[in-house]
Image (tube, grey):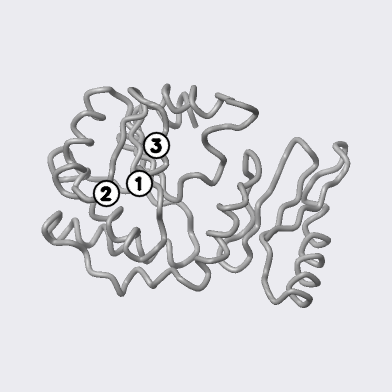
Amino acid sequence: LAVVEAKRTSHDPIEGKQQAKDYADALEKKHGQRPLIYYTNGYKTYLWDDRFYPPRPVAGFMKQDEMELAIQRRETRGELKQYPVNKDIVERPYQLLAIKKICEHFEEHHRRALVVMATGTGKTRTAIALVELMQKANWAKRVLYLCDRDSLIVQTKRAFTKFLPNTPAGDLRTKRVDTKERVCLSTYATMMNLIDEVEDGVRPFSPSYFDLIIIDEAHRSIYQKYQ
């Protein structure tokens, strides 16, 4: 499922990148499956799924089922452009164009996209339509929707219930994690507390628990305080 190249703490983990790739090449040749690649010095850890994305720093390792899902998706996830946008959720041309551009961006192996829309133009509905499309295409199983105010959580949960009634959405401010829920709503502060929690030696969220993270009103505080 994965190979880890561990360097001394005094070394830059990037020094292990080529060595980790060599191990992955050998394992793929032996077992017929390309493993995920990690390289680390114990302080900094990089994840490299070289079938889709360039290396990136991560806070820790995937759990076994998450590794299995990541490898399975190499074969099972569809092309986003082949899935129609649900026009019962959004129908304005600029909303459809925004979703189209985001999907094109992701399929070019980028991991982040910024959507700028004026107040009242339907950002939440655009996000909900994107979630539905990515779930249908098997790109996203679990989604985290972050807001900077409690009132936005209430509004967003109401919108998800209305437009995606068959997709369970939970409010992390008021209850524990439910693995059945496909959308989790949270404020930044609540999420920061939850990712630091440990119960029986296990954190509720690994760095790969969520497949898609949507940050609402990102300009307000995400870059200044939470990064």
Q: Nearer the viewer, mark 3 or mark 2?
A: 3
Q: Which amino acid lies under the numbered mark 1 shown in the image of this protein?
A: Arg
Comparing 34 with 17, the one in front is 34
Q: Which mark is residue 101?
A: none
Kindly report the distance in space between the C-alpha atoms of the residues bearing marks 1 and 3.
9 Å
Q: Which mark is residue 178?
A: 3
Q: Mark 2 — residue?
A: 167
Kindly report the distance in space between the C-alpha atoms of the residues bearing marks 3 and 2.
13 Å
Q: Position of residue 43 (x, y in %)?
A: 75, 35
Please give the name of the residue rendered at 28% of the width and 64% of the height, measured from the top-left corner.
100
User: To which quarter of the image does residue 175 belong?
Assistant: top left
Q: Position of residue 142 (x, y in %)?
A: 40, 48
Image quadrant containing the N terminus: bottom right
User: To which quarter of the image does residue 70 belong?
Assistant: bottom right
Dot 3 or dot 2: first in sequence order is: 2
Q: Which amino acid lies under the numbered mark 3 shown in the image of this protein?
A: Asp
Please give the name of the residue rendered at 72% of the width and 39% of the height, measured from the top-left corner.
44
What secondary structure is marked by label 1?
Answer: loop
Q: Nearer the viewer, mark 1 or mark 3?
A: 3
Q: Are marks 3 and 2 in contact (CB under 8 Å)?
A: no
Kindly report the distance in space between the C-alpha atoms of the residues bearing marks 1 and 2.
6 Å
User: To which quarter of the image does residue 8 belong?
Assistant: top right
Q: Position of residue 86 (x, y in %)?
A: 18, 61
Please give the name of the residue rendered at 77% of the width and 45% of the height, measured from the top-left corner.
40
For label 1, the crowd category at 10 Å Cα-Cα, with few meaning under 14, some 14 to 19 and many 20 or more, is some
For label 3, the crowd category at 10 Å Cα-Cα, with few meaning under 14, some 14 to 19 and many 20 or more, is some
Dot 1 or dot 2: first in sequence order is: 2
Q: Are marks 1 and 2 in contact (CB under 8 Å)?
A: yes
Please give the name of the residue rendered at 67% of the width and 69% of the height, measured from the top-left corner.
34
Q: Give the side of residue 144 with respect to residue 132, left or right.
A: right
Q: Mark 1 — residue?
A: 182
